[in-house]
Amino acid sequence: MTTNMPINLDALKMTSFQVFSKLEGAVTSGMIHLGDRLGLYTALSQGEGDTSISLANKLSLHERWVREWLHNQVAARLVACDDLSVELPVFYLTPEAIAVFATPDHPAYGMGMFHRLPQTMNALNYMPESFRTGIGHNYDSHGPEGAVGIERSFEPWNQNFLVPVVLPTLGSGYEALKRGAKVADIGCGSGGAALLMGRTFPNSTFDGFDISQFALERAEERKSQEGTANVSFFDPRVHAIAQDNSYDLICTFDCIHDMTRPTEMMSIIRRALKNDGTWLLVDIKAHDSLELNVSKNPMASLLYGISVLSCMSSAMSEPDGEGLGTLGLSSEKAETMARSAGFTSFEKLDIEHSVNAFYAVRP
């Protein structure tokens, strides 16, 4: 493509529209963060609707700021209003919007990534150096709010579906849980899945491993609040994962693609797992090529961007990190890596999820 070709004015307008629509999305994402942080969505979800005055009064906020926020939200078609022509429009959330914005236990709840949006976008300040050196930043670079954001992102679905839908598909692994199994949750984050399984299967013991100090602190805090005695949390750099074939079940939820050395981790998992054990591998749905990811995933641009700011950055946070990134672990690649680590059975589980794929991997 030469640089001296004439400019098509219609194409120029469309290019400008595309560019600034991305900026609109970024700015509105910031407004979503504020709506969540200030409790605006929760307040809107209660009652038949609010004017800017009544909503501001509910939360002891300044009406003029609330009014401008509402104008952004209705323009973005996130908040509804039946008549914008009146002097004091009444704004409300549809039932679907209530589920996404204001119902933390609904599987469609979506505020987790917006919770950590300031920390994620702050990575832009140190990304230029990463591009020069090749070295990224681990999840603790996002601070404690980063850990909470991850928690809020994944737990609504897990709390609804992990026990009744996912675990029963594991067959012998599920039966072992009911009898009494030794389980490892590697990349456990703030401990939600481990604590949920601990409450559900009191005959089993659960070891959660993570390298994020903020996530481990949050996990210990939650464990103390719940009083769950059969769950423990460890930093594997201090308390190594036992490679003695002692675990009946090992889980990795959305973390293998974030690891600096996933190939080594798969070998560790194989040596930690009993010969009749099960590895539940959950990771982002991905394809083997850029072409397929772009053509088949309407959220590909978001996922590649999050990869630069978070997932791949974590996977490159040590010298010689493998750098899989958000869309770097396709089913085919995961199976190839697992078989190279000594596993002989790789089964894709029949579980519907908008983002993740689920696999039962066995020796």
Image (cartoon, rainbow, N blue to C red):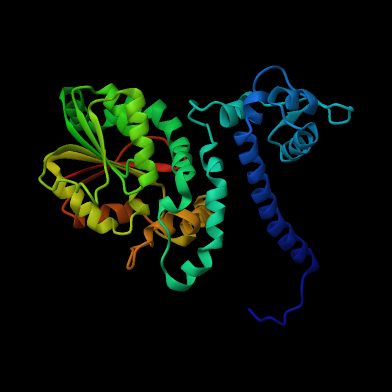
Is residue 243 or residue 294 the one in the foreground?
243
Taking the image as drawn, is residue 362 in sight?
A: yes
* Residue 231 falls in image quadrant: top left
Is residue 110 or residue 217 the one in the foreground?
217
* Residue 49 falls in image quadrant: top right
Q: Is residue 185 left or right of residue 114?
A: left
Q: Is residue 263 left or right of residue 316?
A: left
Instruction: Determine whether 62 is above or below 31 in the image.
Output: above
- Name the outermost residue toward the top: 47
* Residue 253 falls in image quadrant: top left
Is residue 214 or residue 78 the one in the foreground?
214
Q: Is residue 24 left or right of residue 212?
A: right
Residue in the image at 33% along x and 59% along y? 260
Instruction: Determine whether 4 is above or below 131 in the image.
Output: below
Image location (x, y in percent) of residue 257: 36, 53
Instruction: Determine whether 205 is above or below 144 in the image.
Output: above
Residue in the image at 51% along x and 38% along y? 112
Residue in the image at 64% along x and 39% along y? 34
